Amino acid sequence: MTRRDEAHALLRAIPLFGVLDADAVDRLAVALEHRAFPEGTVVINEGDRGDCVYLVADGELEIWHDGRPRGGVVRGDVLGEIALTEDVPRTATVLAVTDVELWEIGRGPFLEAVGPSAAALLEAQALRDERLRRLRD
């Protein structure tokens, strides 16, 4: 299986993207860019403008908000979707706890795929609500 095939399978396994039709998933798979970050790297800075979404392919990350850790992120998780779906600044900082491999989806391809899908928007809202709850707790 190629890296691109693995990314496609990862997209299908994530509820936010699993509800999309096959054509939308195929377009996202083509738009994916592989990114690697070493341990200790800040991947997302709270307050920055969101220009992409990340899918975690490998490694562990930690979410920080208001100077406190708010939970971990592992393979199969999505990062950065709130900034894109809500058109707000990044809501948290995300730090690579280990070396990580991510798949990046730019703002345009992400919104073109998710925006027209009522089911994907519901998944995005549920994910947003869970993330915001974790930030408040």
Image (tube, rainbow, N blue to C red):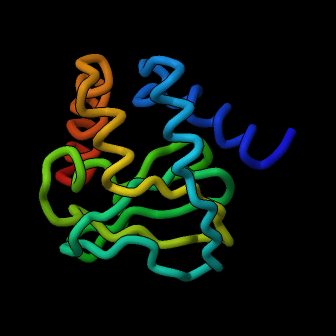
Residue 118 coordinates in the image, percent (x, y): 23, 18
Of the 4 image quadrants, the one containing the N terminus is top right
Q: Residue at x 52, y 81 (%)?
A: 41
Q: Residue at x 68, y 55 (%)?
A: 58
Which of the 4 image quadrants contains residue 69? Answer: bottom left
Residue 14 coordinates in the image, percent (x, y): 51, 31
Is residue 1 shown above or below 95? Answer: above
Q: How many marks?
A: 0
Q: Is residue 14 left or right of residue 44?
A: right
Q: Residue at x 24, y 40 (%)?
A: 128
Tell me if residue 71 can be seen. no
Which of the 4 image quadrants contains residue 110? Answer: top left
Tell me if residue 43 can be seen. yes
Q: Residue at x 58, y 45 (%)?
A: 30
- In front of the other: 24 or 72: 24
Residue 119 coordinates in the image, percent (x, y): 29, 17
Q: Is residue 6 left or right of residue 28?
A: right
